[in-house]
Amino acid sequence: GEGVARLWARRKIAALEASRSFNADPATTDRAIEKVALEHHLVSRLTSLVAVDVTRSRPNDEKLSNAKVPLNLPQGWEYDKVFGEAPLPAMPATRSLRAKSFAQTAEMVAAAPSAEAAQIAALARSLQQPVVLPEAATLAGLAVWVGAGLLALAGALFALTRRRQPRRRPHWMFE
């Protein structure tokens, strides 16, 4: 059976590996190991197996298409302000400038991940407000001070509770 043949092949490869150091020509032994491993589809020191997936993810006759994917910016952020595009001037806008601003706002609203984010993006764009970045979620400064205080307390307790041993004199002083 197939299972017995593979067990035999594994033992044959092990025996060839063990006899490799005693043979005069290790290259001949390596070729024999490789031959047995390939015939029985086994992994050895000289061979490995590669899996190739041949399933198709899309049919051959289906054409590729491009699509804009919505950005995943945090709520209230504006892409242009975060990534450095110059804001529109604060002077009264001309008709073309208004059209450009409207087009940019429409793009941001379309790319928003939710309706609420789209409303915030449109409002922030119309008011030309700067992006307010969120603060850290932890109280890192407080944690540093608490840690430093606990280390100081531990050092003071160690110094107070340590037993002082009498100082020993070298043995030559007693003679």
Image: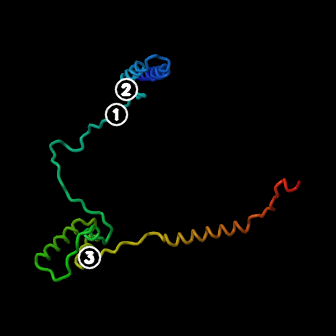
Q: Earlier in the sequence, mark 3 or mark 2?
A: 2
Q: Earlier in the sequence, mark 2 or mark 1?
A: 2
Q: Quadrant of residue 29?
A: top left
> Could you tell me residue 74's position as x and y percent?
33, 67
* Residue drawn at x 18%, y 70% as measured from the top left: 104
Q: Is residue 110 placed above or below 88 in the rendered structure? A: above
Q: Is residue 76 placed above or below 40 in the rendered structure? A: below
Residue density around tag 2, few if under 14, some if 14–19, many if 20 or more, within 10 Å: some
Residue density around tag 3, few if under 14, some if 14–19, many if 20 or more, within 10 Å: some
| Disc 3 to disc 2, C-alpha distance | 64 Å
Report the amino acid beneath label 1: Val
Q: Quadrant of the C terminus?
A: bottom right
> Could you tell me residue 151's position as x and y percent?
61, 67
Q: How is the image coloured?
A: rainbow
Circle 3 SS class: helix
Report the amino acid beneath label 3: Ala
Q: Mark 2 highlights which residue?
A: 41
* Residue drawn at x 24%, y 41% as measured from the top left: 56
Q: Mark 3 highlights which residue?
A: 124
Circle 1 SS class: loop
Q: Mark 1 highlights which residue?
A: 50
Q: Quadrant of the N terminus?
A: top left
Report the amino acid beneath label 2: His
Circle 2 SS class: loop
Q: Circles 2 and 1: CB distance less than 8 Å? A: no
Asked whether, in this view, residue 56 is left or right of residue 31, the answer is left
Q: Is residue 173 placed above or below 103 in the rendered structure? A: above
Asked whether, in this view, residue 24 is left or right of residue 70, the answer is right
Task: Check the image and name the residue furthest to the right.
Answer: 175
Q: Is residue 163 placed above or below 45 in the rendered structure? A: below
